[in-house]
Image: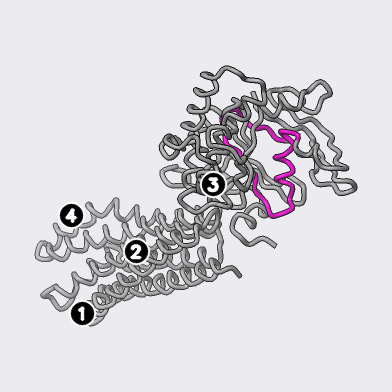
Amino acid sequence: MTHLDTELAKLKQQLFEMWLLVISQVETSREALLNFDKGAASEVAFREKMVDTYELKIDRDCENIIALYNPVAPDLRLTLAVLKINADLERIGDFARGIARFIKKSPKKSINPELLRVCQIDELIKNAVDMLTDAKTAFENENSRMALSIFSQDDFLDDVHKNSNKIIADYIRKHPDEIDEALHLHSIIRKVERIGDHCSNIAEEIIFFLEAKVLKHSGKKKL
Amino acid sequence: MAKIETIDANLYYGDFHALKNISMKMELNTVTALIGPSGCGKSTYLRLFNRMNDLIDNVRITGQILVDDEDIYSKNINVDELRIKVGMVFQKPNPFPKSIFENVAYGLRVNGEKNKSFIEDTVVHSIKQAALWDEVSDKLNKSAFELSGGQQQRLCIARALAISPSVILMDEPASALDPLSTAKIEELIHELKKEYTIVIVTHNMQQASRVSDYTAFFYLGELVEYGQTVEIFTKPKLKHTENYITGRFG
């Protein structure tokens, strides 16, 4: 094992730790939202600082590896992929904190389960967590086929987001006294949809690392 | 049209098969880097193009080695004329024990040039081309040995340029130089390729990636992979090449 191999292994290890933390942040924000649990929401806000710390550390380590070891070919692709995935994970962490912030700041003690149901919040966030978990497994096992499967998982999030204007408008018409919560839920759907987009970006980076193929802006999510 | 081409080139040192069926083309005004571990045949391959291997006993060469579509190993080739066309710069700077001016003028003089003003103009032009003029313009009559290693190497490049070659072979031209002198040589290579076709042997991967347009990876006398430098250093086709450029060789 070369010195660079050791550094890259350490870099990956840190990214996996950050990844697990971000998965846990999204899951906890889901629980906080479904149970209107302000304690869980506070926990997400607190742990966001840890996500940021990981981001800074991984950024610096990637910079050092490029400067000190001049990686090429797969080593360079791995370093660049980690750098980009790092940024994606940090943004996903921000979205989880955004979801938690709504619960933490809400003056109410509960949310109408009917609103959660029509917005398919549980399914949406579970889908996002699955994408995030599958992406981690694909990266860990260097499995480009699994990375490719993530693109189709994004379709559900996109569909719900596309229909969310109508869903929220209908809900507000039926429950005019819940207009604030409904609008917040609309913004949460948008956040979850963005999490899905970042997971798709991560899948692109994994394929770039493994196959040296750039799928970004190609419109073709096929190898 | 390829400036240099080899077709099934083989070279034997006695019984030792040092180059095995090497076929590749080098385009006009490009820099091609030859990389590979010690003993892989890259310097031997480089020396095919100015017939430097002729000076070694028991060497046998087969296949075709073409410069400007002409087989340089055919019987009617004048080796002195070939070496005017194909200049060479070596690993260690090897100036003659003469003045800076005379070092550069030497090639012209031995080739029979007598016109003083032509010699003077050519020497100045060559030293300028070798990015050395600003450092030596006021001491052209001083001994070449007074120059630093990096300056001596650029003087040797100026000496090679003075006889108007169209190909320059460089055998690890910066391996004995400090980083600043290395950077100057690399910049110079970048400038020179506008007018010359350059083939460079280097052990320094970063140097190969910085200066060359094409890279050829040699191993045990075989050409393993040859392609655009950007491709070789980002997505080599073969695992063997990948292992070498990433330092996981062997």
Specify whether A219 is left or right of B168. Answer: left
Q: Position of residue A152 (x, y in %)?
A: 45, 54
Residue at 21% across, 60% down: A187
Q: Badge 3 is on which residue?
A: B209
Q: Amino acid at mark 1?
A: Lys
Q: Position of residue B81 (x, y in %)?
A: 71, 24
Question: Magenta stretch containing residue B50, yes or no?
Answer: yes
Mark nearer the N terminus (2 vs 1): 1
**Residue B66, visible in the rendered structure:** yes
**Residue A148, visible in the rendered structure:** no
Task: Point out which mark residue A124 bears.
Answer: 2
Q: CA distance from mark 1 to mark 4?
A: 27 Å
Question: Magenta stretch containing residue A29, yes or no?
Answer: no
Q: Quadrant of residue B213?
A: top right
Q: Are marks 4 and 2 on the same chain?
A: yes
Specify whether A147 is left or right of A59. Answer: right
Q: Badge 1 is on which residue?
A: A38
Q: Badge 4 is on which residue?
A: A169
Mark nearer the N terminus (1 vs 4): 1
Within 10 Å of the Cα at label 1, are there few (<14), some (14-19), or many (20+) other Cα atoms?
Answer: many
Mark nearer the N terminus (4 vs 2): 2
Q: Are marks 2 and 1 on the same chain?
A: yes
Front disc: 2 or 1: 1
- Circles 4 and 3, Cβ within 8 Å, touching? The answer is no
Q: CA distance from mark 4 to mark 3?
A: 59 Å
**The magenta segment:** B24-51
